[in-house]
Image (cartoon, rainbow, N blue to C red):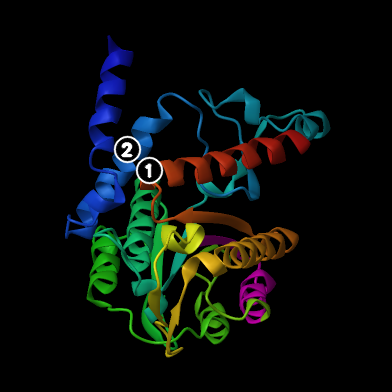
């Protein structure tokens, strides 16, 4: 009966997790709560061991601790039991870097814009981290740093972040590299930096900016948010395309360009992913057509697997 109830709850939540439905919910805090509840329902009883994969330190074993985390090499040397303590146990400080440039404003057919989707992802992950007693912060940018809230764990922190995301309207170009350099000097200690963006910027510049965070030993996560139209190019009739970052207008016959366009997008996404992985940064491509809880579940499940793999090697 319990399993049936869990499944019913999960099915009920999914009615509200369609991006088109979420777009009708004006309150971002409510969106975040729905997404996280759906995410937790999707987990059922699967093991999930936190957001960070970084080993931090040891602490002495206490009754009730999971014996799987005992460091047997240390025990052999000291004849005492110590637990491997990972970053999620050490008050992780996470900063979300949210792209508010004009290209993030794109939306179609009453769905969420890329910015609305990215803001909902940001709020959802921040909400989840707060439930783990971790500190969260926010930077919103276009060609300038529009808002910055240092990581904190106070009760009203998420409310402050959501307010800043709500009041921003995407309207300018992206200056991602320079923003990364500014933020790398602002974030005071090693932590997690999560970039949420469509990455419509020079890839070499993006890499230089993100490497600045790696230079200070931050863990870097890149959530690449693209609209479903950008990934599938479903247009059939002659269409006037208007650039959202001062790139002009162009009338084209879409079917003649579709194959070349899709190949270019696929090559771009693969190049971004290769670049991130080669520099030890996590990468996840997310479509605005994806249910948000499902997108978070697949991403975080992959990170949980990385935690287990890293622990097995130690």
Looking at the rendered image, the quarter that the C terminus falls into is: top right
Depth check: 200 or 3 in front?
200
Q: Position of residue 68 (x, y in %)?
A: 64, 26
Residue contact at pointers 1 and 2, CB within 8 angstroms: yes
Classed neighbour count for the residue bearing mark 2: other residues with Cα under 10 Å, few (<14), some (14–19), many (≥20): many
Report helix, strand or loop for mark 2. Answer: helix
Residue 150 visible in the current orientation: no
Instruction: Give the number of marks.
Output: 2
Looking at the rendered image, the quarter that the N terminus falls into is: top left
Give the residue pinned by disc 2: 38
- Region rendered in magenta: 205-224
Residue occupying the point 58% across, 44% down? 303
Depth check: 26 or 260 in front?
260
Check the image and report above or below for 169 versus 228.
Answer: below
Horizontal side of 277 relative to 291 (left or right) equals: right
Q: Position of residue 116 (x, y in %)?
A: 31, 64
Residue 147, quarter of picture: bottom left
Give the residue pinned by disc 1: 293
Check the image and report above or below for 204 versus 45.
Answer: below
**In 3D space, how far apart are the residues under numbered discs 1 and 2 (Cα atoms)?**
6 Å
Report helix, strand or loop for mark 1. Answer: helix
Does the magenta segment cover residue 206?
Answer: yes
């Amino acid at each position: 009966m319990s399993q049936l109830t869990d499944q019913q709850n999960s099915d009920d939540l999914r009615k509200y997790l369609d991006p088109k439905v979420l777009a009708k919910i004006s309150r971002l805090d409510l969106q975040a709560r729905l997404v996280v509840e759906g995410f937790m329902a999707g987990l059922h009883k699967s093991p999930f061991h936190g957001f960070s994969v970084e080993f931090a330190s040891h602490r002495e074993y206490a009754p009730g601790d999971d014996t799987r985390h005992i460091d047997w090499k240390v025990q052999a040397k000291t004849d005492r039991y110590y637990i491997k303590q990972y970053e999620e146990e050490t008050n992780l400080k996470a900063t979300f870097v949210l792209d508010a440039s004009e290209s993030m404003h794109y939306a179609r057919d009453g769905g969420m814009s890329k910015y609305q989707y990215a803001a909902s992802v940001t709020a959802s992950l921040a909400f989840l981290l707060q439930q783990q007693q971790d500190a969260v912060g926010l930077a919103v940018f276009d060609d300038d740093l529009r808002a910055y809230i240092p990581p904190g764990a106070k009760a009203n922190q998420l409310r402050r972040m959501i307010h800043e995301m709500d009041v921003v309207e995407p309207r300018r170009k992206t200056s991602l590299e320079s923003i990364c350099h500014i933020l790398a000097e602002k974030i005071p200690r090693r932590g997690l930096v999560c970039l949420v963006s469509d990455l419509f910027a020079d890839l070499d510049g993006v890499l230089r900016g993100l490497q600045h965070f790696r230079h200070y030993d931050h863990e870097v996560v890149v959530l690449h948010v693209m609209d479903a139209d950008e990934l599938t190019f479903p247009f059939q009739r002659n269409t006037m395309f208007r650039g959202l970052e001062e790139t002009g207008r162009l009338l084209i016959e879409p079917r003649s360009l579709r194959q070349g366009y899709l190949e270019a997008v696929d090559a771009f996404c693969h190049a971004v992913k290769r670049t991130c992985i080669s520099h030890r940064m996590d990468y996840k491509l997310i479509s605005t057509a994806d249910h948000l809880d499902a997108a978070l579940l697949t991403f975080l499940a992959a990170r949980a697997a990385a935690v287990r793999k890293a622990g097995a090697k130690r």
